[in-house]
Image (cartoon, coloured by chain):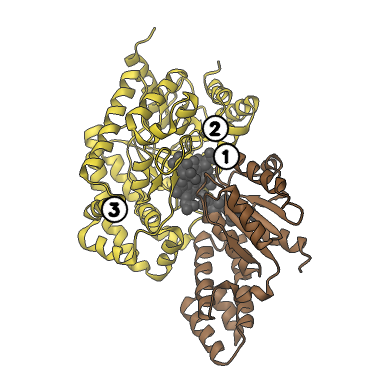
Chain colours: A brown, B yellow
Amino acid sequence: MSQNLVNAMADLEETALVKEVKALQAQGTPALEIIQKLQEGMNIVGKRYEEKEYYLSELIMSAEIFKEAATLLGGDLSAADSHSHGTFVMGTIYGDIHDIGKNIVTTVMSCNGFKVIDLGVDVATADYLKAIQEHKPQVVGISCLLTTAFDGMKECISAIEAAGLRKDLKILIGGGPCDQTTADYVGADAYCKTAQDAVEYSKKLLGIQ
Amino acid sequence: MKSNQELYQERLNRMTQAVTLGRPDRVPVMAWIDAWAATYRKGSMAKLSQSALYSNKLILETAKDFPQLDMIEVGAALPRAVAAATLSTVKVAGKELPEGSLWQVEELDHLQEADYDRILKIGWKAYKKEYYKKVLGWGGYDTFKLILGGIIAGRRCKKAGFPELSGAFPNIPLDPLAGGRGMAKFMTDLYRMPDKLKEVMDIMVIDIIEENKGIIKQAKPFSAFLGVARGSSNFLSPKLWNKFVWPYVVQIVNAMVESGTFVNLHFDGEWNRDIERFKELPKGKCIWASDSVTSVYKLKEVLGDHMCIKGDVPPALLALGKPEDVYSYCSKLIKDIGPTGFILAPGCTTPYNTKVENFKAMIAAATGQ
Ligand code: B12
């Protein structure tokens, strides 16, 4: 029963989840269908997090279990690529190394069916430009937890614009000290308070239910 | 003109009154100045990040321009020591980074699962020594040099009339383990091998307490700095927090207080869920230092009669706000959280792009000048 899988994911029951994935595989269930069940479980995790039943510890654990299951399915999250809603390029701006929040955003986005290109931390403007040219994302995310790196975001966004790459994409920013004023200051399209905001914004942008 | 020694005593008294929940003549104001000293003094970030004594020189030059400051958090900027305490490596200006850059703590997984067994076998003190040698390339001499730099910096602060807030730096076991292992791996370890981690932490805390008791006996600091970066209430569910964070906070605080020092609870991030618990700590002995994310109003309401609160001028306000806004934020804090049991200060460190007028506005709110 694949409802077991959804529950195992939502309740972070690692052993049960691995067992269930293997059983479904043995029955010949398509990988994509299994991934969709896992995503359903992840949505419950997300909801429990918003409701403060879960905390960062549970979000991170859920991401690890999800990755583990995806590996079992023969590959990483890109198993769902052919089916992805769109592409999301994300990194932490140069000068800044905080990545706990960024990793949550990338995980939540990939669990929601986006193809995610994670550029890591301390990412230079040139690397954003290169990734945008190469992957043609619809959404770019920049994470920043240091007020001292706000000017870096501003410079990066201007450079994306100057390179003529701004037309077909939206730029989101987020991270502890950011707010709408920061988004206005650096010239981003939107400020997101949580990872879930990024999902909702991107889905709305791309007309996905 | 008061002598530096008189000023030192006056500042110390004001801070002591605040911490012991007495009545200081005014709300004390202080700051943790590290990278900002390089900006303010137009000094070299590369040298500041690498030399304890150079950083101490810039910090004291900065402090002297703001003589109403009652304390500075620490007399030197020691990014390498701070990173090493949590088993992290750090990139600094002039080495891995260009001059002018702020240091960057690296998130790597130097610590493997087998290391937990190693700690159990040889103890934390010996393990740390091994780790420093292997991962950081540090020998005993490097550690000694850092400690010596800190001691000399402390003496120079005293001579200049500025007391240091903290002079011993214990950690709860969670922070070095999570720093050395990497956050994601560590969190999954908490799920996959909770009993082993508990055992490791119980071993670690013995050495942590012993080492810091020794330091306190020698150096007699105003307070021990207990910083928790990865154990806040929004990081861990209550079940994990009650097992892996709180028992060690209690043990360490009690041991430090017994050794005769105050404890500076440097708790960045969001702790709202668990504020009630802090009533379990000894009264009038701790400083709850908030970076502005935990609700300072809730802290006052719950802990106002129990411990002193420090903070919580937000970094973004100091860096980007207008002096009027800083002044009114700080005046409101003094009115609502003071006049007793409160120390006005930036949330965490003074950001390196703090505007000078904003720093002045913060001080003016406390001194009324
Ligand atoms: C953990 C932590 C660290 C860890 C980082 C570990 C890691 N690998 O990330 C360590 C200890 C290494 C560290 C180092 C430093 N830190 Co630090 N750190 C923190 C702390 C306590 C928590 C940050 C965190 O992980 N929060 C939890 C995550 C989940 O939240 P989040 O990142 O905000 O992400 C959520 C949302 O914002 C959103 N989101 C985030 N990004 C994005 C992006 C997009 C596009 C979207 C859509 C959404 C989104 O989604 C996430 C989930 O909902 C904060 C305190 C605070 N108040 O935030 C300080 C803090 C960020 N650090 C700070 C500082 C100053 C530093 C140091 C310079 C410290 C020093 N003085 O030595 C260094 C070096 C930093 C550097 N050069 O980059 C300051 C920044 C102040 C400022 N000037 O702005 C803070 C605010 C503490 C303080 N009050 O002073 N830090």
Q: Quickly name the residue at label 2.
A: B353
Query: In the rendered structure, which amino acid carries the disc numbered 2?
Result: Asn
In the rendered image, is residue B291 in sight? Answer: no
- Indicate yes or no: mark 1 CB to ligand 1 under 8 Å: yes
Q: Chain of mark 3?
A: B
Residue A159 is situated, as x and y percent measured from the top left of the image, at: 67, 45
Q: Report, in whole angstroms, how far the alpha carbon at label 1 lies from the one at label 3.
A: 35 Å
Q: Position of residue B325 (x, y in %)?
A: 64, 28
Q: Residue at x 45, y 58 (%)?
A: B183
Q: Are marks 1 and 2 in contact (CB under 8 Å)?
A: yes
A93 with respect to B348 (left or right)? right
Residue at mark 2: chain:
B
Q: Is mark 2 within 8 Å of ligand 1?
A: yes
Q: In the image, is residue B162 above or below residue A21?
A: above
Residue to which mark 3 is pinned: B205
At numbered mark 2, what does the secondary structure look like: helix, strand or loop?
Answer: loop
- When asked about the image quadrant of residue B332, the answer is top right
Q: Position of residue B307 (x, y in %)?
A: 43, 38
> Label 1 vs label 2: CA separation?
8 Å
Q: Amino acid at mark 1?
A: Thr
The residue where tag 1 is placed is A147
